[in-house]
């Protein structure tokens, strides 16, 4: 088998991989290879034809393909090498990759690797949905692929389980195409998707959203004929008296995304239970030296702008690592406390300013995020609305944490 | 002549197909009629996939003798058919002295049935075979194996087909008439005739009997639900571990089962159903299986449950009686030429090659069976999936055929070539499930979220599918409702 | 007086705007609270008088490397006009190649906007190849 050498290999040509490649190239690194399993670059953005991308990065409301194209254009004008229609079969801790394509098998020895594989959708099996196994049950993203890329009508009477953004976007999309979206059901007491999507995808079209309500059974031996739904109590247990049958021919699932970390595990990268992504330092380096992670494979983002920004930093970090410009200073752990579900990076050097990304555990109003070193407050951000669906970022200045031992992040009401 | 056969077999499950293949070694003309669009759509694909040793059945019963013979025939059969089988062995574990007694009873019973290599192990020996197994003694049965049950069923059908057997898939038998020379069978829109008729209709076997005026059989479908676990847990179990049997229980108890593909199954449950096609999974049983799974496999996480399924056992005893009744395999005197198989539940999969031999002998008493010179019992293709090969073997295959280089299903690492082979299967089945069962694409942790759109595209580009042509499993289970926009005039 | 709340959709922050309005036929806004930017305030005023939306869809392409070219309105359109505009989009077919930004429909249903392509679609000679 042929073996080639590369300074930097990026796995995945979606928004994270593209931004990482572009920033690494701009930092002066020349020997970069981006591996993409599809024919074209852009990843999931290719099927996200709705607008709302790029408000932070480009100050414009772009659609997914437009947003992707800006990065693809830059990637191509910088002359970065891409290997499309190629899948990475394995990744070792010494950063050796085995890749496969129609052209054959190839081993690649990389000095640094950036993981940018994105995430996958949770399925009916993953949420142990009882009932029959008929046709007409799709994850929202798969449905989006059929509708937006393959010109296929997936259903006429649609129920959506889960109020994640893709589900909300598909509710509007299918309505505009003439389908009847009966309702969206959400197990949690608050929507999982962005507030603006609830407004412009559901409210605009009078599609009802039932909170604290879930689907408890699928019906129909062949094609789906309907679902049993019911309200749930605080412990998410079904309230039997509220059980009702909702006829439909299609169920779309928008019940969460899972970082696609099989290759990371393959390499021995340590994962964090709270994010299902790698544990990283402020260079976004994983537990394996020279292997970095960014985008939805690191933690599921709600905005692509944040993915691009994070990935740009990672591209720069990888170059610094390759140029031996990073020192392995004592690491300061960053720990989630009161009302914080996770905070990332999980450890920082304390030598440079750092932006922490975090999510809260529950919706809150008029509260502040506090970062403390023992009793000393090192950063604070006041917010009107705090919601688990919306990632919060907070800057911590290096000068405030020089001799810090441990940073604790919490919500103070 | 068209539509006239020496032998017709009703039901394309593992037993029907094993009989078809056995008869395809001879010069008689054989057809299999199946109401579903594919083979292996009932009990044959919906079970634990265990090749039993034969310790559980009373000496002198058909279940005992056919199980032990079937088990011994399976290794060569699987080699010929390129079906993966793994004789990993089984530990039946006793927790107290009372259960130890039952282990010795099982050992004596197994030995009387001719089961090889049975041994009672003490905890030290158990620990060596399977760490942390618990219990005070265990019966080790090394001849217990695991197999992919639908792979075997499909392979039997394909090999029978390659040797001249005709398959009428999607043809439901609606009436059977006994004539002077044999039988007239109406199935789908076809009228077929045969000299010998074999009933291997599984859950519908009693119904087929009634079409011929035989009313003394009744099938009580008994559902078993399973959960499928992520391959991450592969290696947690070296061999099968069952609890020692308790008297008065119908099944073998909920347990973990390794599969040849590396997933672990939790199940099965035991619930009688009215409907012989009710393959639903229920909230209560799923919750119970999850609980038991966490006890049996402490490292199990919620994210490890990737899918659930259920199967139905064609039991001959109603719920109030329970337990097992012996297989019915009979050449009817009152309906000459009718060979009747009823109540082939566990260990039907293991017994299938032995049942085929037994039925072959019954057919021979009705028709002369001369060996066919051109019979080829070997199936072409690979036993292993592409991803199970060494890197060198893979590289060679990709060089030979670039379609091996393109991975379509990323979770199971199934290549485009394997998907194409599944689409172009010899039986000509074109459902999405037929591709799934043959290639394993869509069976991984993302359950087709990634590869179904790709497979849909392959079917469109290379096979001219229109949106309305995609069926999940039968004609009433379309995937789509046409094009979103008309793009052609 | 009438109290209304709206979730701002200008950006993903989704501010909760609280509006006090005078009751009557014509909406007269007395005060807007909760918006954290001027764009948001503008949007709230617009939303209460004449809500506007950008819509996205797809148009079949003949002989392209995508089956559909993704499209959007190049300016927000009145919420009440969405289905009329969609009806025009649904009738349209185009031929490859298409470039990002191409105006595919002008003033659909008389609405002041254009339907523009949001991706490049290359000419392939066959309409069956698609991507994803």
Image (cartoon, helix red, strand yellow):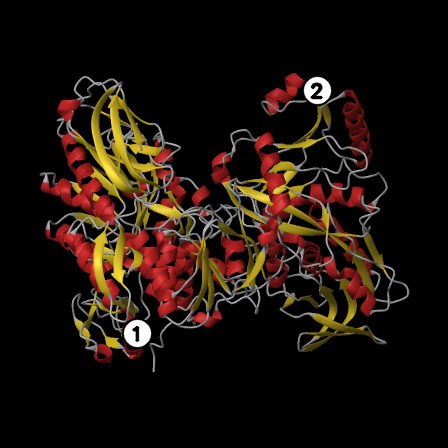
The residue indicated by pointer 1 is: C86
Q: Is residue B481 left or right of residue C42?
A: right
Rendering quarter of residue B162: bottom right
| The C terminus of chain A, quarter of image | top left
Give a yes or no on whether discs 1 and 2 share a subunit: no
Residue at x 22%, y 54% (from the top left corner): C32
Mark 2 Cα-neighbour bin, 10 Å: few <14, some 14–19, many ≥20: some
| The N terminus of chain A, quarter of image | top left
Q: Residue furthest right?
A: B334
Q: Is residue A192 among the parts visible in the rendering? A: yes
Task: Give the percent coordinates (x, y) of residue A333.
Answer: 28, 23
Q: Is residue A413 left or right of residue A395?
A: right
The residue indicated by pointer 2 is: B136
Q: Nearer the viewer, mark 1 or mark 2?
A: 1
Rendering quarter of residue C130: bottom left
Query: Relative to residue A288, is residue C39 depicted above or below?
Result: below
Q: Is residue A211 left or right of residue A290?
A: right
> Between B393 and A236, which is closer to the camera in this rendering?
A236
Helix, strand or loop for disc 2: loop
Q: Is residue B378 among the parts visible in the rendering? A: no
Task: Give the percent coordinates (x, y) of residue A328.
Answer: 20, 21
Task: Give the percent coordinates (x, y) of residue A408.
Answer: 29, 25
Which dot marks residue A250?
Answer: none
Chain ID at mark 2: B
Helix, strand or loop for disc 1: helix
Residue at x 62%, y 54% (from the top left corner): B280
Q: Residue furthest bottom?
A: B489
């Amino acid at each position: 088998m042929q073996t080639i050498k590369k300074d930097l290999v990026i796995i995945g040509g979606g928004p994270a991989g593209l931004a990482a490649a572009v920033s690494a190239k701009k930092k002066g690194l020349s020997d970069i290879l981006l591996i993409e399993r599809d024919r074209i670059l852009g990843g999931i953005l290719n099927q996200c034809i709705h607008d709302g991308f790029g408000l932070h990065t480009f100050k414009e409301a772009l659609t997914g393909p437009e947003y992707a194209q800006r990065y693809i254009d830059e990637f191509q004008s910088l002359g970065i090498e891409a290997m499309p229609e190629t899948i990475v079969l394995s990744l070792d801790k010494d950063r050796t990759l085995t890749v496969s394509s129609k052209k054959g098998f190839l081993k690649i020895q990389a000095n640094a690797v950036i993981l940018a594989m994105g995430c996958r959708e949770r399925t009916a099996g993953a949420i142990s949905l009882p009932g029959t196994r008929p046709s007409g049950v799709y994850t929202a993203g798969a449905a989006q692929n059929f509708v937006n890329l393959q010109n296929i009508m997936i259903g006429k009477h649609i129920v959506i389980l889960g109020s994640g953004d893709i589900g909300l976007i598909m509710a509007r999309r299918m309505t505009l195409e003439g389908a009847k979206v009966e309702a969206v059901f959400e197990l949690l007491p608050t929507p999982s998707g962005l507030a603006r999507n609830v407004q412009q995808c559901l409210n605009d079209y009078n599609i009802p959203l039932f909170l604290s309500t879930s689907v408890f059974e699928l019906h129909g031996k062949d094609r789906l004929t309907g679902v049993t739904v019911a309200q749930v109590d605080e412990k998410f247990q079904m309230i039997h008296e509220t059980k009702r049958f909702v006829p439909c021919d299609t169920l779309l699932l928008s019940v969460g995304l899972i970082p696609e970390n099989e290759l990371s595990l393959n390499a021995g990268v340590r994962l964090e239970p709270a994010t299902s992504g790698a544990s990283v330092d402020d260079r976004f380096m994983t537990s394996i030296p020279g292997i970095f992670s960014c985008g939805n494979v690191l933690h599921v983002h709600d905005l692509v702008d944040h993915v691009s920004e994070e990935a740009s930093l990672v591209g720069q970090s990888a170059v610094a690592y390759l140029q031996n410009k990073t020192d392995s200073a004592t690491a300061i752990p960053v720990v989630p406390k009161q009302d914080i579900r996770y905070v990332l990076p999980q450890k920082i050097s304390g030598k440079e300013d750092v932006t922490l990304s975090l999510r809260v555990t529950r919706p809150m109003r008029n509260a502040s995020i506090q970062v403390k070193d023992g009793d000393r407050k090192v950063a604070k951000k006041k917010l009107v609305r705090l919601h688990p669906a919306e990632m919060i970022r907070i800057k911590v200045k290096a000068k405030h944490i020089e001799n810090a031992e441990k940073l604790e992040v919490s919500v103070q009401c | 002549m068209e539509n006239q056969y020496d032998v017709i077999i009703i039901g394309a499950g593992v037993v029907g197909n094993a009989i078809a293949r056995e008869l395809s070694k001879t010069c008689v003309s054989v057809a299999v009629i199946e109401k579903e669009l594919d083979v292996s759509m009932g009990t044959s694909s919906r079970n634990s996939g265990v090749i039993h040793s034969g310790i559980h059945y009373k000496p002198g019963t058909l279940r005992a003798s056919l199980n032990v013979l079937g088990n011994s025939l399976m290794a060569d059969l699987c080699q010929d058919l390129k079906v993966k089988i793994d004789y990993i062995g089984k530990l039946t574990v006793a927790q107290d002295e009372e259960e130890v007694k039952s282990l010795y009873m099982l050992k004596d019973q197994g030995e009387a049935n001719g089961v090889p290599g049975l041994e009672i192990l003490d905890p030290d020996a158990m620990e060596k075979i399977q760490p942390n197994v618990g219990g005070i003694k265990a019966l080790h049965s090394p001849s217990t194996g695991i197999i992919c049950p639908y792979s075997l069923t499909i392979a039997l059908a394909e090999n029978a087909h390659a040797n001249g057997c005709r398959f009428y898939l999607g043809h439901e038998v609606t009436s059977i008439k006994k004539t002077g020379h044999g039988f007239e069978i109406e199935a789908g829109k076809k009228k077929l005739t045969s000299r010998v008729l074999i009933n291997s209709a599984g859950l519908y076997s009693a119904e087929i009997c009634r079409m011929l005026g035989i009313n003394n059989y009744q099938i009580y479908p008994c559902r078993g639900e399973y959960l499928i676990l992520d391959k991450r847990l592969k290696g947690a179990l070296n061999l099968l571990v069952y609890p020692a049997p308790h008297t008065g229980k119908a099944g073998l108890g909920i347990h973990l089962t390794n599969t040849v593909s590396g997933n672990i199954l939790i199940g099965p449950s035991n619930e009688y159903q009215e409907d012989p096609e009710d393959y639903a999974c229920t909230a209560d049983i799923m919750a119970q299986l999850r609980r038991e799974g966490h006890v049996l496999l402490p490292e199990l996480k919620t994210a490890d449950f990737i899918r659930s399924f259920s199967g139905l056992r064609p039991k001959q005893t109603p719920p109030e009686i329970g337990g097992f009744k012996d297989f019915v395999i009979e050449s009817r005197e009152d309906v000459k030429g009718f060979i009747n198989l009823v109540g082939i539940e566990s260990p039907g999969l293991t017994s299938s090659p032995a049942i085929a031999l037994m039925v072959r002998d019954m057919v021979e008493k009705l028709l002369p069976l001369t060996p066919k010179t051109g019979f080829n019992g070997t199936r072409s293709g690979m036993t292993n999936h592409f991803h199970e090969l060494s890197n060198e073997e893979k590289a060679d295959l990709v060089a030979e055929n670039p379609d091996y280089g393109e991975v379509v299903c990323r979770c199971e690492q199934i290549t485009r070539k394997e998907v194409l082979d599944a689409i172009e299967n010899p039986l000509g089945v074109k459902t999405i499930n037929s591709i799934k069962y043959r290639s394993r694409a869509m069976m991984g942790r993302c359950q087709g979220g990634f590869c179904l759109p790709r497979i849909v595209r392959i079917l469109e580009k290379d096979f001219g599918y229109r949106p309305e042509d995609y069926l999940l499993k039968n004609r009433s289970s379309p995937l789509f409702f046409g094009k979103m926009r008309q793009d052609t005039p | 007086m009438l109290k209304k709340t709206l979730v701002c959709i200008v950006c993903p922050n989704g501010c909760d705007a609280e509006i006090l309005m005078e009751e009557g036929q014509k909406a007269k806004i007395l005060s807007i609270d909760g918006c954290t930017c001027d764009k948001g305030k503008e949007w709230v005023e617009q939303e209460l008088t004449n809500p506007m939306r950008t819509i996205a869809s797809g148009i079949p392409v003949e002989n392209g490397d995508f089956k559909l070219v993704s499209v959007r309105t190049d300016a927000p359109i009145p919420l009440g006009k969405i289905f009329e505009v969609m009806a025009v989009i649904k009738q349209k077919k185009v031929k490859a190649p298409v470039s990002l930004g191409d105006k595919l429909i002008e003033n659909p249903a008389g609405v002041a906007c254009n339907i523009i392509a949001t991706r490049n679609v290359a000419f392939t000679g066959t309409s069956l190849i698609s991507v994803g």
